[in-house]
Image (spheres, rainbow, N blue to C red):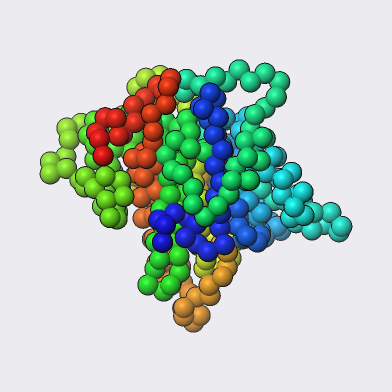
């Protein structure tokens, strides 16, 4: 187990970053088309091909999922991924034509100190292609891919991932780009809200404080620095359990509990918080006569791994020239 979403067999993840831009793209690509759905709980989402993931609609599987910076400009990353997949002959078959299905979500990182004067050529299509070409079982966390220029209320954000294998044998993993309006830590302390779910010191091992810091009932947000609009946490949960689109949508809904446990506040009118849920369908329920019990356990695990992935994103962030916020490591050490 790598403690990454790629612990789910059949998945690869690639990152591409532009350090001058302070932005980037992360692509998750399954070895074969995989069933997917989505749950959007933030008030300001930016998406492409999200509607087709509703269980009511026809297309059942996707060829890749894309997380990108760049606000609406970043939606072009999916175009680059789509064209590269088309060249490989992948896609939804319509007669003799094939159309790669590449849903995507973006976060707002246009005010993070990077050079956004890219002129007439949108850079995100090329970043999407680069991220797809880099897709592998191992990938970097922190200030890479879609997390390159991400921020939170008080610290640099980043890209995070975590995984767990359940007693049933099913595996579930999370991948998240954290650019939240709120904070992943308690006040000005180094303690993560996600501390109860931490495994093996994966984000510093600080636990919860002996006494809770003063003022944590008054959440700090980017609005304190008049940075409204520069927000969103976008994520993917993936499993090898064979789930329908409706079951995947419920899994995505339950994974949002991980946002609420790791970020405060979450799901605001200024966040585009969303979760894609994907299944490779390689594993059947351990007890076919009672699949709901296993689905409940899987959903609970999705919230826990999402919380861990969010904290890992902040813990792994790295300092870069021109940053507008410090990293967790710079403020609190390892």
- Tell me how many marks there are: 0
Relative to 54, 269 lies left or right: left
In this view of the protein, can residue 303 be seen by the observer?
no
Q: Residue furthest left?
A: 210
Which of 46/205 is in front?
205
Q: Nearer the viewer, residue 266 or 172?
A: 172
Task: Residue at 29%, 55% (x, y): give it.
Answer: 199
**Quadrant hosting residue 322:** top left
Residue 217 placement, left or right of 39: left
Task: Using the rendered image of the protein, determine whether residue 224 is visible from the camera's viewpoint.
Answer: yes
Residue at 71% across, 58% down: 58
Q: Quadrant of the C terminus?
A: top left
Q: In the image, what residue occupies the spot 12% across and 41% down? A: 211
Q: Position of residue 38 (x, y in %)?
A: 56, 51
Q: Eyeballing the image, is 229 above or below 191?
A: above
Furthest residue toward right: 96
The residue sitting at 56% across, 70% down in the picture is: 282
Please state, as top left, top right, bottom left or bottom right, where the N terminus lies in the image: bottom left
* Residue 127 percent across, percent down from the top left: 62, 36
Percent position of residue 107, x then y: 52, 34
Q: Position of residue 52 (x, y in %)?
A: 67, 51
């Amino acid at each position: 187990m790598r403690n990454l979403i790629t612990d789910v067999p059949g998945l690869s993840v690639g990152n591409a970053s532009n350090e001058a831009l302070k932005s980037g793209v992360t692509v998750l690509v399954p070895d074969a088309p995989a069933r997917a759905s989505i749950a959007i709980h933030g008030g300001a989402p930016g998406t492409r091909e999200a509607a087709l993931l509703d269980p009511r609609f026809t297309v059942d599987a996707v060829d890749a999922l894309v997380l990108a910076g760049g606000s609406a400009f970043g939606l072009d990353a999916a175009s680059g991924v789509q064209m590269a997949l088309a060249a490989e002959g992948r896609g939804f078959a319509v007669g003799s034509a094939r159309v790669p299905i590449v849903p995507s979500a973006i976060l707002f990182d246009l005010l993070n100190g990077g050079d956004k004067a890219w002129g007439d050529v949108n850079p995100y299509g090329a970043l999407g292609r680069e991220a797809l070409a880099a897709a592998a079982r191992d990938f970097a966390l922190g200030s890479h891919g879609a997390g390159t220029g991400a921020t939170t209320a008080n610290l640099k954000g980043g890209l995070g991932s975590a995984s767990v294998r359940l007693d049933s044998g099913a595996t579930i993993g999370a991948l998240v780009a954290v650019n939240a309006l709120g904070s992943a830590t308690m006040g000005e302390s180094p303690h993560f809200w996600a501390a109860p779910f931490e495994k093996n010191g994966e984000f510093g091992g600080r636990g919860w404080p002996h006494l809770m810091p003063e003022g944590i009932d008054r959440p700090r947000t980017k609005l304190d620095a008049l940075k409204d609009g520069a927000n969103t946490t976008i994520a993917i949960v993936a499993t090898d359990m064979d789930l329908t689109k409706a079951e995947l949508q419920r899994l995505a809904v339950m994974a949002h509990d991980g946002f609420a446990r790791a970020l405060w506040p979450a799901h605001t009118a200024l966040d585009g918080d969303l979760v894609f849920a994907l299944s490779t369908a390689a594993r059947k329920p351990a007890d076919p006569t009672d699949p709901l019990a296993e689905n409940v356990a899987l959903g609970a695990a999705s919230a826990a791994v999402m919380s861990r992935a969010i904290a890992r994103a902040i813990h792994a962030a790295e300092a870069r020239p021109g940053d507008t916020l410090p990293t967790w490591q710079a403020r609190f050490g390892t």
